[in-house]
Image (tube, rainbow, N blue to C red):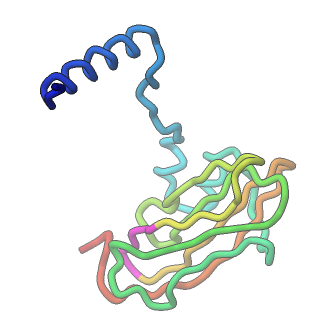
Amino acid sequence: MTTRRNLLAQSAKVLALMAGAGLLPQTALAAWTQAAFDAKTMAEAMKALGAGAPVSSGDVTITGPDIAENGAVVPVGVSTSLPGVKRLAVLVEKNPSALAAVFDVSDAVDANFNTRVKMGQSSNVMAVAIMGDGRVLFAQKEIKVTLGGCGG
């Protein structure tokens, strides 16, 4: 009769063998640019990400509430249907650090992301698409915050 204790002991041995053979994945770490997340303005963030000046475009979409009841968790969606997108970024104009999120996009990934950002006050929120050909396109939406998120 197999007991729970025996099963766990056997599982631990199997996992140890797999780890020794290199069959288990190693620790995954996110790659990000500290300078981009430290940027205070949209221009500084784009420069740190290696992108040029953004141009307003109807092909980039940003969604979010008109009024956020809690600035600590504001739902925001960014998307584009343009081919050749390399990165999508979310920036909050009046936050201490403008860049809130960056998503790397490949051909196997649909350029449509939803996240939650922290906002200290009412501000313009921008979705920026960095294209493979060097173009930088953006859309923006004003989101009003009724309770503070970043500043208390």
Q: Which residue is drawn at 74% across and 55% down?
A: 130
- Between residue 67 and residue 77, name the one nearer to us: 77
Nearer to us in this view, 148 or 106: 106
| Most common SS among magenta residues | loop
Residue 132 percent across, percent down from the top left = 82, 48
Q: In this view, does 3 lie to the left or right of 55?
A: left
Instruction: Looking at this view, name the residue that lies furthest to the front.
Output: 1
Q: Work out which quarter of the rendered image holds the C terminus and state it.
A: bottom left
The residue sitting at 77% across, 59% down in the picture is 136
Q: Which residue is drawn at 63% across and 69% down?
A: 78
Between 36 and 80, which is closer to the camera in this rendering? 80
Q: Position of residue 34 (x, y in %)?
A: 48, 42
Q: In this view, does 150 lie to the left or right of 86?
A: left
Image quadrant assignment for residue 116: bottom left
In percent of width and height, residue 149 lies at: 31, 74
Residue closest to the eye, 23 or 71: 23
**Magenta segment range?**
116-121
